Image (cartoon, rainbow, N blue to C red):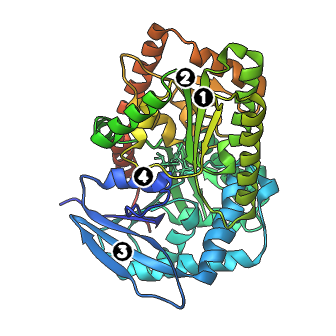
């Protein structure tokens, strides 16, 4: 019998309203056909400590913990999303290095470790996800765990000197050596990691993506996360998505639709995108009264000031574009600050002529892949993709742009809007092949195979 898979992530996909991040979507998809244990935060904030909640969903056991307000504020908002998220997305200017947060981050990781240990079996394989839980393996090892433990970083790995700005960077990165395997989204991330551990931690490269330091041997690798293409295609043909498609194509029958979908996050390049769209209208006025940008941005981490500021900036930019460029019968930007139900989303993707996926930095970006999967191959839309998304290493047939270059991005949007059918079909076919070959099941299997091939932890 193969070992039981134990997945640990900050959040679990639990069907609750609100925006699930990409990690929950990817893991939910990866778990579909296999049992195991999924452990993480329940999403609840409580007064005082709470017990572990365990429930069975088919072959999958879900085990969740609540967080106290204090833990939530320091571990989740403070350190994970106020320090690690901005620095890992190259935004040192937005990082709040308040020393108090690190204690909460350590404490919650310790608490996760203590609770998890009581659920583990000796032959489990443990797969820990993302920046919230970097030190979890070192806490588990301290409690005597000898199981194989892998870690996957869903967000980018920043360059050495940027990472070194985090006061606790050495502690954080040293703790990665408690894992047997560390996986990244892209070659660029692996390169940054490799430089960092050698230059800052004195690690020694031991052949193919293997590093030794602190008496440990760590295997690293690149495993670009994929989507469940079959499941998304099925959703696209489902009733909710078809209804959405019909509603949108009817409402915008005289327009060419551009679409942006994400969490409202400064890494996603939303103001830059709106400026590029505005430049398109200025430089290529034939798109006036025709091109309409639907921008869906779901609420995210609103307790953080940087997110609240972004929301205001975006609302003001949309207002300015609609007020100055719009007409009585044409609203250039439809901005919706909401989450679109997952079953309807593919209908929206399919109705769009162009998707604008233009983050300033992104680990992978699943929206780019979902858009491709939802297209009609006979009349597909065009993907405009930031070269700074991890997905750009794979999705070469998209129109790759530098989102900081407003002028060039506007030109690429123009090219996308007016691309002939045969070119659209050719590009889409290649892109679809790529996301099929490296789908979420491939991602899971290749990571777990690489983890199984590592030497057992001493
Ligand atoms: P995220 O930054 O959350 O994920 P992304 O990869 O784009 O971003 O995934 C977002 C997911 O949430 C997609 O499945 C999308 O459909 C859904 N979603 C986003 N906004 C939505 C909205 N307004 N309405 C409905 N659904 C919405 C992190 C990293 C990424 C990495 C993933 C997975 O930041 O780089 O790709 O993890 O590894």
Q: Distance between the residues labelled 4 and 1?
A: 28 Å
Q: Residue lying furthest left in this view?
A: 1
As measured in the structure, the alpha-carbon distance from the residue carrying label 1 to the one carrying label 3 is 44 Å
In the rendered image, is residue 424 in sight? yes
Element on which disc 4 rests: helix
Pointers 4 and 2 in contact (C-beta within 8 Å): no
The residue beneath circle 3 is 63
Mark sitting on residue 255? 2
Pointer 4 residue: 25
Q: Earlier in the sequence, mark 3 or mark 2?
A: 3
Q: Is residue 4 visible?
A: no
Foreground mark, 4 or 2? 2
Is 7 on the left-hand or right-hand side of 11? left
Q: Do the CB atoms of the residues marked 4 and 1 lie less than 8 Å apart?
A: no
Point out residue 68 in the picture as x, y percentages from the top left corner: 56, 83
- Report how far apart the C-alphas of labels 3 and 2 lie in the structure: 47 Å
The residue labelled by disc 1 is 292
Q: Quadrant of the C terminus?
A: bottom left
Q: Which of marks 4 and 3 is in front?
A: 4
């Amino acid at each position: 019998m193969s070992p039981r898979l134990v997945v640990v992530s900050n959040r679990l996909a639990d069907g609750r309203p609100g925006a699930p991040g990409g990690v929950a979507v990817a893991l939910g998809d990866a778990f579909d056909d296999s049992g195991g244990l999924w452990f993480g935060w329940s999403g609840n904030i409580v007064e005082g400590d709470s017990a572990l909640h365990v429930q069975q969903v088919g072959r999958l056991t879900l085990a969740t913990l609540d967080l106290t307000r204090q833990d939530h504020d320091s571990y989740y908002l403070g350190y994970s999303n106020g320090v690690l998220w901005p620095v890992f997305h190259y935004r040192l200017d937005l990082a709040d290095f308040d020393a108090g947060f690190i204690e909460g981050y350590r404490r919650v990781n310790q608490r996760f470790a203590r609770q998890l240990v009581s659920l583990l079996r000796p032959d489990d394989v443990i797969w820990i996800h993302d920046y919230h839980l970097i030190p979890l393996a070192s806490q588990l090892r301290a409690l005597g765990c000898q199981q194989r433990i892998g870690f996957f970083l869903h967000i980018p790995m920043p360059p050495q000197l940027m990472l070194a700005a985090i006061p606790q960077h050495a502690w954080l990165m040293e703790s990665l050596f408690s894992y047997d395997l560390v996986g990244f989204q892209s070659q660029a991330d692996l390169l940054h990691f490799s430089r960092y551990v050698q230059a800052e931690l004195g690690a020694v490269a031991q052949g193919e993506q293997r590093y030794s330091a602190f008496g440990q041997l760590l295997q690293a690798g690149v495993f670009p996360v994929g989507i469940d293409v079959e499941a998304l295609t099925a959703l696209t043909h489902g009733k909710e998505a078809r209804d959405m498609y019909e509603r949108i194509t009817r409402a915008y029958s005289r327009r060419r639709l551009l679409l942006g979908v994400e969490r409202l996050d400064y890494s996603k390049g939303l103001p830059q995108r709106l400026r590029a769209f505005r430049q398109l209208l200025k430089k290529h006025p034939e798109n006036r009264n025709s091109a309409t940008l639907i921008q869906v941005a779901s609420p995210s981490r609103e307790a953080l000031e940087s997110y609240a500021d972004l929301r205001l900036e975006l609302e003001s930019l949309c207002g300015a574009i609609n007020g100055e460029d719009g007409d009585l019968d044409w609203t250039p930007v439809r901005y919706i600050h909401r989450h679109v139900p997952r079953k309807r989303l593919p209908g929206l993707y399919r109705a769009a002529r162009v998707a604008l996926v233009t983050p300033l930095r992104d680990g992978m970006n699943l929206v780019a892949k979902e858009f491709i999967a939802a297209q009609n191959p006979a009349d597909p839309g065009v993907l405009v993709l930031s070269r700074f998304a991890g997905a750009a290493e794979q999705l070469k047939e998209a129109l790759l742009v530098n989102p900081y270059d407003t002028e060039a991005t506007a030109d690429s949007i123009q090219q996308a809007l007016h691309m002939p059918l045969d070119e659209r079909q050719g590009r889409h076919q290649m892109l679809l092949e790529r996301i099929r070959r490296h789908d979420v099941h491939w991602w899971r299997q290749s990571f777990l195979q690489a983890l199984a091939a590592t030497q057992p932890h001493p």
